[in-house]
């Protein structure tokens, strides 16, 4: 069971890192492969986002490919079979945020179901 949990956490981490890749973030098609249709985000700004609104933002060329997100302290835990919760610290051009994501395994792979960011100093 531990190996299965470790594989699930690792798969969710790999998907999260893909979603943070500037080249992926700049592509609505690639982002849509990683977001669950029922996706919900509560952003660091306090704004609520769904998959449609995220894809609208990523399609307006506002994501700079040269601006990577620096990630540290990433950890994950299996909440239930096919459900992984990740937490980590992200620094994006000096904007520092604690992040929390819930990933679920679907017929087409791991998809982000929920995400929240909280600004920190």
Image (cartoon, rainbow, N blue to C red):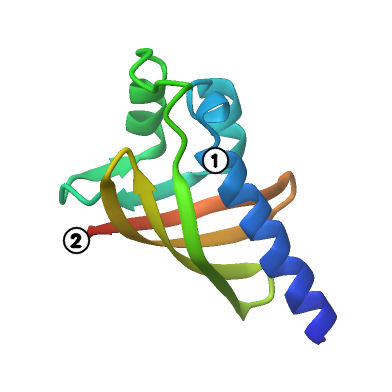
| Residue plotted at (27% across, 44% down) | 94
Q: Nearer the viewer, residue 105 or 13?
A: 13
Residue 34: horizontal and vertical position, in percent?
59, 41
On residue 121, the disc is 2
Residue drawn 59% across the image and 69% down it: 84
**Other-residue count near label 1 (Cα within 10 Å), few / some / many at <14 / 14–19 / ≥20:** many
Residue 91 image offset from top left, x and y in percent: 36, 49
In the image, taking residue 48 as reference, residue 22 lies left or right, namely: right
User: Where does the image place residue 92, in percent across and percent down from the top left?
Assistant: 35, 42
Q: Above or below — where is 53 with respect to 15?
A: above
Q: Quadrant of the C terminus?
A: bottom left
**Residue at left offset 28%, top offset 53%:** 96
Above/below status of 77 relative to 28: below
Q: Which residue sits furthest front?
A: 94
Q: Which residue is mark 1?
A: 19
Disc assigned to residue 42: none
Label located before the other in sequence (2 or 1):
1
Image quarter (top left, top right, bottom left or bottom right) of the N terminus: bottom right
């Amino acid at each position: 069971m531990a190996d299965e949990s470790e594989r699930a956490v690792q798969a969710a981490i790999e998907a999260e890192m893909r979603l943070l890749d500037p080249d992926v973030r700049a592509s609505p098609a690639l982002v849509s492969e990683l977001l669950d249709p029922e996706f919900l985000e509560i952003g660091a700004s306090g704004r609520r986002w769904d998959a449609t609104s995220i894809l609208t933002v990523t399609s307006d060329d506002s994501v700079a490919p040269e601006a990577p997100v620096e990630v540290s302290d990433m950890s994950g835990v299996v909440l239930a079979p096919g459900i992984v919760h990740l937490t980590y610290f992200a620094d994006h051009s000096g904007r520092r945020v604690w992040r929390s994501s819930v990933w679920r395994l679907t017929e087409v792979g791991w998809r982000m179901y929920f995400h929240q960011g909280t600004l920190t100093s």
